[in-house]
Image: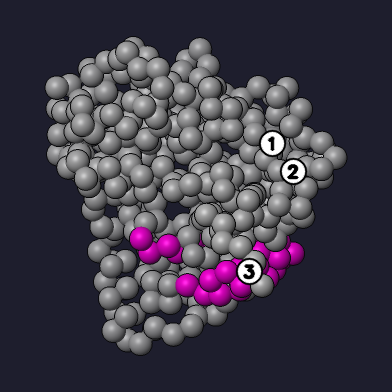
Amino acid sequence: MITSSPADPLVARMRPFGTTIFAEMSALAVRTGAVNLGQGFPDTDGPPEMLAAAAEALASGANQYPPLAGIPALRAAIAAHEQRFWGLERDPDAEVAVTAGATEAVAAAILALCEPGDEVVCFEPYYDSYAASITLAGAVRRPVTLRPGPSGRYEFDPDELRAAFGGRTRLVLLNSPHNPTGKVFTPAELETIAGLCREFDVFAVTDEVYEHLVFPDAAAPHLPLASLPGMRERTLRISSAGKTFSCTGWKVGWATGPVRLISALLRVKQFLTFVNGAPLQPAVAVALNLPDSYFTGFTAGLRERRDRLVAGLTEAGLAVLPSEGTYFVTADIRPAGGTDGAEFCRGLPARSGVVAVPTQVFYDHQEAGRHLIRFAFCKRLEVIDEAVRRLKG
């Protein structure tokens, strides 16, 4: 029975989470007519083979509930994709689950694996849904800060990472390639993480949605944590179609891992979305089976966009940090006279007609990222050129 009418009926644990920065900045872009390099969504559609397969599925009646774990064709395509690119063998009938994007997969994994009071080790800055999912589970974040090293490449302190582990640690949440920094974790860094997972006997949840968006000048190619010794049996590996196939609005993702972890995830997913994207699942299966030339061509196109934007941001007076992967690049605003990223980004549309995102909102320790902002380069070249023209003013 409701005995009062509080001004904010939201439960206390969720009150720190306001409107996401992506929604705020995208609304600001619309209101001001600014070029939106804030939110990471492409402005072109994905491969035509995938789009045609979706249209065919819609027209042929694939519009009712699919199986909870996803249609067999997509689960088989996901398993084949992991074997083809990463050498990971999966049973498509037991070790693959289709989800409503990677965001649901992360949330379902945390809700399935964490009891209230359990601790989750993660790397900050982090994608904003991570903190909310951990809070919803009643778990506790133990962030380890990524900081630019002498080369500008983001690094973590191994001692700080070890100190984050303890008797209440339940899992490690790792995103590589990493949003928002563009960092690709090296084999040595991954082995440090894996060693602690094995030592403390904890699970790993890996968000690898940018697995194909790694550039040739990265310190290392992408390597799934699950491929390291002793990690397959304790790792849920997550990816999605949105980033690789430029269909972020479809929200078709997946998780792969050992039977016990996939079963746990599905026990939660069934009470979140139950199922998702029936007519889109056959199309994603088609996309996953595209030839290697699609994946290499997609990455090459993004590299050209990255290089174009980095050059323009540098000419505009920002100090740009290396982006090894994803479709994001971060920049230090201090050479341009800025000190606070949120203030800088909120004024940027009126000042220059461009939208960026302050990365400080992705930190628990906001001072570590107060001077940094993020730009997305998953846009047409002419859009990037226009943004650069405006920034250079």
The residue tagged with tag 1: helix, strand or loop? strand
Task: Name the side, left or right, on which 368 lies relative to 311.
Answer: right
Q: Magenta segment, which residues?
A: 249-276
The correct choice, above or below, for 389 with respect to 275 in the image is above
Lower sequence index among marks 2 and 3: 3
The residue tagged with tag 3: helix, strand or loop? loop
Image quarter for residue 58? Answer: bottom left
Query: Mark 2: few, some, or many residues within 10 Å (few <14, many ≥20)?
Result: many
**Which residue matches tag 3?**
2
Asked whether the viewer can see residue 26, the reply is yes
Query: Mark 3: few, some, or many residues within 10 Å (few <14, many ≥20)?
Result: few
Name which residue type carries label 3.
Answer: Ile
CA gap, disc 1 to disc 2?
A: 7 Å
- Which of the numbered marks, if any, corresponds to residue 297? none
**Which residue matches tag 1?**
142
- Which of 387/230 is in front? 387
Find out whether residue 269 is within the magenta segment: yes
The correct choice, above or below, for 276 with respect to 336 in the image is below
**Which residue matches tag 2?**
119
Image quarter for residue 201? Answer: top right
Task: Name the side, left or right, on which 122 lies relative to 305.
Answer: right
Name which residue type carries label 2.
Answer: Glu
**Number of numbered labels in the structure image:** 3
Image location (x, y in percent) of residue 272: 57, 69
The residue positioned farthest toward the front in the image shown: 4
Nearer the camera: disc 1 or disc 3: 3
Task: Name the side, left or right, on which 70 lies relative to 2.
Answer: left
Name which residue type carries label 1.
Answer: Arg
The residue tagged with tag 2: helix, strand or loop? strand
